Each structure stands twice: as C-alpha cells, then as structure tokens.
Amino acid sequence: MGRIAALFCGLLFGAGLALAGMMDPAKVLNFLDVAGTFDPSLAFTMGAAVIIAFLGFRLVRRRAAPLIAPAFHWPTATAIDSRLIGGAAIFGLGWGLAGICPGPAIASLALANPHILAFLVPMAAGMLLANGIAARRPRLAEDGPVRERTK
Amino acid sequence: MLPATEFTPLPSALGGALIGLSAVLLMALNGRIAGISGILGQVLARRDPGGERLLFLAGLVLGPLVVALLTGGIPQHLPTSDLLLAAAGLLVGFGSALGQGCTSGHGVCGLARLSPRSLVATLVFMAVAALTVFLMRHVGG
C-alpha cells in the first residue's frame, strides 16, 4: 500500500510540475527575471502549493499516525547555520543559471530529451559529494538528512 | 537567451495545488515529507527500504506523461549549452544536499510547516537565483 501511495503521490507531483510550467526553464528564468521578461505565473504555483500544504498538514497533524506507515517523519532540523545558508545560496546559483531544480530535472525524463542528462548526472554527483562531505564532518552531520523525529 | 513566456495564472495555480496535494497525501499516507532532493539523496545512498522513494520518483516521471497525453505536449526550452547545464546541475545537487532541501522541501513543505529555517533557505535561494538571472541577462551574458 505504501508503494502504491508513493507512486501516486509522485504522479500527482509530476503532473503538477508539468501543468504549472515548472518543467520549462524559460518560464522559471522569466519568473526570476523581475527586471526583464518577468512572468509571475510561478508565484501562483508556489502560493497554491504552500496554501494547500499548510491547510493539509494542519489536518494531518491531528492524527496520531499516518494511514499506512506506522509513524510520521516530520523534519527535525531547526538550525539556521552556515551549512543551510551556504547550501541554499549554491542551490540558488545553479537554479538561476539553468532554471532547473531537482523535481523538474527528474520529471523531464518523461520528455526523453537526452540533454537533460547533462544536468541530471552532475546533479546526482553533487548530491553524493555534499552528503559524503557532511557525513565525514560530524559538526556538519549533526542535522544530517537521516535524523528524523517521529510524532 | 530563452524566449519570453505567456502569463498562465490558472494552470500554474492548478499545478501548484496538485503539488501541495501530493505533499499532504505523502505525509498523511506514508508519513514522509515530499522533498525531492531529500528523496533522491536517500535513493542515491541506497536508503530506500521497500522501494517507496524510487516509486515516488517513477511517479514523478509518469505524471508529466499523463499531462502530455491530455494536453498534447509540455513546453520545454532547455538552455542550449550542455556545459552550462552540467555546471548548474552540479551546483543544484551540491547546494540542495548541503542545505538539505530545494524548492519542494524548503520552498513548499517547509514554508507550509511555518519553519523559520525553511523560510531563510527559501529567501536565500530565491534571492541568489534572481540575482544570478539579473547578472546573466542584464549585466554580463
């Protein structure tokens, strides 16, 4: 059941990215180009996604456990540190260069344009590199991605 | 430079609603947060018991196929330089893993949880991305 739920949620997410226009780097870069060919469409995407998730999470939090899995795994990290800010800045630089973030990068496999691999393969390598560095440095790994709180 | 794009508030809001719904359902059903960089990072690290994360990523590819069948196609203009794509991909992967979240984990789920940490991350990556586009299009480029 958990597998079917995961597949279905992924499908919804991918369909959302496609409908929203997030899979078009031109649209993403125009959203970021406030001083030029500004296209504010994706502000509606972010707004709708955050509002739905905010209301939905509030309902979900009333429950003791998820419907399928035994426990909730809400993120636990709260530190606002150099790792967070440095990581977000590096991510923002890459996002601004090509107009592609991880979700649309993976979803783009559906369009079968081999050039997306020029982005995807280095993206995976970058993730492995950062997670490898973080795992070797305990201070950085304190809020590592595997630490979770069950509620 | 990539072409100008049409303002599409309705489909873009509808797409956002689907993304939000997906995040809510993944937590309500499986108890997991819908952060794409986190999910891919776990799959790459072989931490995917039951294969649920990989199936989520498979769904992520199936979703656009369904939309393409229904609407007749999905517009996509990729930057033409593979070198630029590779550099951007490396930065996106490294930065999202280091900052433990991307547009979905921090930008959607984190903001929806009212997480100050995710708010800071979102403001930083939005500002840096907008500045990068400004410099590429209006100063250098």
Image: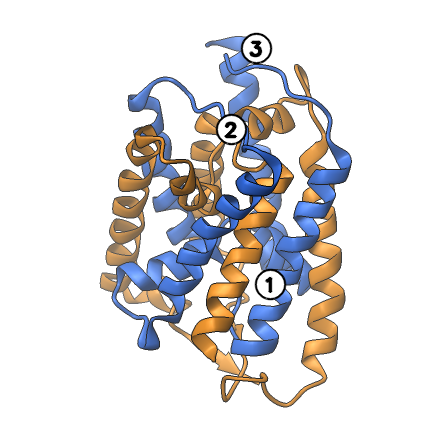
Chain colours: A orange, B blue
Q: How far apart in space, not on screen, are marks 2 and 1 (Cα)? A: 23 Å
Residue designated by label 1: B23
What chain does badge 1 belong to?
A: B
Three-letter amino acid code of the residue under disc 3: His
Looking at the rendered structure, whether the residues under marks 1 and 3 are on a common chain is answered as yes
Question: In the rendering, at what x and y percent does residue A118 appear?
Answer: 29, 31
Q: SS for tag 1?
A: helix
Question: In the rendering, at what x and y percent does residue B28 appear?
Answer: 61, 76
Three-letter amino acid code of the residue under disc 1: Ala
Nearer the observer, A8 or A101: A8
Three-letter amino acid code of the residue under disc 2: Pro
Nearer the observer, B20 or A91: B20
Residue designated by label 3: B138
- From the viewer's perspective, is residue A33 above or below residue B49? above
Counting residues from the N terminus, which is met first, the one under dot 1 or under dot 3? 1
- From the viewer's perspective, is residue A126 above or below residue A3? above
Nearer the observer, A144 or A15: A15
**Residues tagged 1 and 3 counted as in contact (Cβ below 8 A):** no
Quadrant in the rendering for residue B124: top right
Question: In the rendering, at what x and y percent does residue B15 appear?
Answer: 66, 46
Q: SS for tag 2?
A: helix
The residue carrying pointer 2 sits among few (fewer than 14), some (14 to 19) or many (20 or more) residues within 10 Å by Cα, namely many
Residue designated by label 2: A25
What chain does badge 3 belong to?
A: B
Q: Residue at x 68, y 61 (%)?
A: B112
Q: Residue at x 34, y 64 (%)?
A: B42
Q: Is residue B77 visible?
A: yes
Q: SS for tag 3?
A: helix
A82 sits to left or right of A72: left
